[in-house]
Image: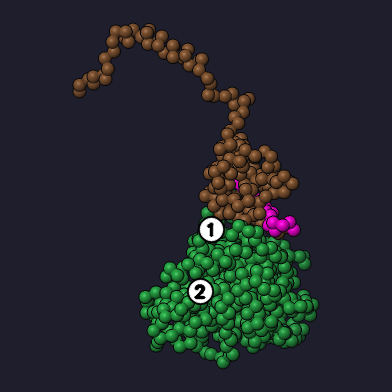
Amino acid sequence: MPKLIIDSKEVSFEQGQTVLEAARENGIKIPHFCWHPKLSISGNCRICLVEIEKLPKLVISCSTLAAEGMIVHTRSEKVINARNAVMEFILINHPLDCPICDEAGECKLQDYAYKHGTGESRFVEEKNHKDKRVELGPHVMFDAERCISCSRCIRFCDEIAKEAQLTFIKRGDRVTIVTYPGQQLDNPYSMNVVDICPVGALTSRDFRFKARVWEMSSTASVCQGCSRGCNIDIWVRNNEILRLTPRKNEEVNSYWMCDHGRLNTFKFVNENRVGMPYIKSGGELIQSTWDAAVNKAASLLKTVNKDKTAFIGSASASCEDNYILMKFARSVIGTKNISYYKYIDENFGDDILRRSDVTPNSTGADLLGMNGYLNYSNLSDGINNGSIKAVYLMDDNIVDKDPSLEALFSKLDFLIVHSSNMTKTAGMADVLFPSAAFAEINGTLVNFNKRVQRLRPAVALKEADRSLDGMNVSRLDKFGTGYDRWAQGRKRDALSGWKIISMIAAQLNNKFKYDTAEDVFNEIVRSIPEFAGLDYELIGKNGSDLKVKIAQPTLKA
Amino acid sequence: MSVKKRAKDLTLLERIYIPEIIKGLALTLKTMFRPKYTMEYPEEKFVPPPSYRGRPVLVLDENNEERCVACGLCSRVCPSLAIDIQASETEREKERYPERFEINMLRCIFCGLCEEVCPEEAIVMSKDYEMAFSNRENAIFGKDKLLVPVSQLKDRIEFLRSYK
């Protein structure tokens, strides 16, 4: 491999790499605004200037190809002076908005101003004024004054989202970003420009001013939007999810996620929750206790012939929950009527990230062996001809999907439902258990590409203790007491599906001995060959491929 | 066991005590004519100098608008985590305002760091030192109790400017 010397350290590189990439791979940090690993090189911010011996002037490292025997200096006096000068130029027209800017705390310009700025301004003239609140699209707000014209957002739309919607207009200090005439920034991936904007020029309209970044904790998890399973961080303050951001994983989603996943998959965790067990009496759901609901469910399950009871799992629930439901149906009740529903939306999928299978764990449910018996028509037929008299339904709002089931479900002897939210299906239940949402549990999901990925609890349930259970804590979580209003975020009374089912099993004299979701997963590993050799630690933050592979088109860089 | 000797053997004059009493009364008499340092609180109120750090308050501008932009720096710098802010958007030029601004006076230690860090001169230490609560809820001051017109805070703001 060819070698070059950066800051008197010899590093090897691959032919075709730039100086910046070679330095980055060897842990040498060169500041950059406009360069992004997944976007084309534009070379307009000039902050990555380095000195290369035998070249007459400083060069930008992001677009200079590394060559054998090159001697590069990234910290020489010349380079530092040039960097200071570039910072000074960028800051001339950058407003001192940090106190009211959402980017503050995760802002590249702020960081570099500390590291590479001189600390004071020689510019005494009035700063340039531009529009401060431009709605570029339904989800993105643009502050033209803060923009440093790096063009990352423009290149993102052109190259990754494949919809050219943004462009520069005007020149010099009047340059600004606009959408093309008659268009707006509304591609399905538009909010990624908020993440890649190195300053606070592009901000999320959904998250705008909700919290400062240092007030939140972030937890590595997986998006629920579709079977891609984009890696995400869940940002929580006071036990409430405030935003999701994509987390880099080259095997799954690179640096990106779609707007649907980012905006629509977490609000149900915050709102309209079931909150406690319910038992139906006199046609109304009455608030109850765990003990009473578990007893009721257990006694109901005894009343109906085992072959006339149908168990319906969920492609949105974790592998652990589905596995325990299956185990319960087979070994405790003794029926093979177990299935789940697939949700396919052909309009949703595209060739970037989004998949037409809009549930996060249908592959996992298939691998566990839940596929087969039921579909919408034969469930309906079964209820109509009396071969199904009772339904146990976990985490699936199927009445919303198929309204004809509403009439059919009222014919049943009983319906037991796990649900995180007060949905139509939940309202029809005879016994309703509050189940934990994806952001509240440990668990695993298998994406369309047979990659097992971990869910981690970001929101604390009533039974959970943030620090004792090893959840991520913010500064406020750490020091808040029961007397502080900012630490009294609601903890919901809900449980993971496998815990609820274990309680019912115990009532039916079958002890399931699991303490944690990890115990359940270890049993899956032992009993299902596809999962062999895995454990939570091995899956880690980036997930782990299952042995059985299906050929899939890879995500283009 | 031996008897401990006293540190000082008193003279005869000291032992008869009367001259010593007269000396003491003379000192008392002298003190009566010196200027007083105490005051008849609460009938008489102490007016602190501008350097005094009383309860932190939010400044209401001349045109009756709060200066605070809810940047959260005071909340971040507060060593005792007394300040809780929820920002929101406004149509005004400043874009942000505090939808909720609460100081827990049981947590506040009157250090003045919030005042020092504020980029808008929106939170200052007032001269108010009379705070007594009968329960924890009353000790949490919201915007209704915190907002004070700038006219009442002139000398503190001048004091701050002379040191910035």
Q: In this rendering, is residue A330 above or below B73?
A: below
Element type where label 1 sits in the image: loop
Q: Nearer the viewer, residue A244 or B57?
A: B57
| Three-letter amino acid code at the position of disc 1 | Glu
Question: Which residues lie in the magenta part?
Answer: B91-105
Residue at the (72%, 73%) spot, across then down: A137
Residue at the (68%, 55%) spot, across then down: B97
Residue at the disc numbered 1 = A120
| Residue B101 inside the magenta-drawn segment | yes
Q: Nearer the viewer, residue A96 or A71?
A: A71
Furthest-bottom residue in this view: A551
A371 lies left or right of A179: left
Q: In this rendering, is residue A257 above or below A212?
A: below
Q: Quadrant of residue A380?
A: bottom right
Quadrant of the rendering where the C terminus of chain A is positioned: bottom right
- Image colour for chain A is green
x, y (%) of residue A328? 58, 77
| Three-letter amino acid code at the position of disc 2 | Cys
A116 lies left or right of B58: left
Element type where label 2 sits in the image: loop
Pointer 2 chain: A
x, y (%) of residue B1? 20, 23
Residue at the disc numbered 2 = A48
Pointer 1 chain: A
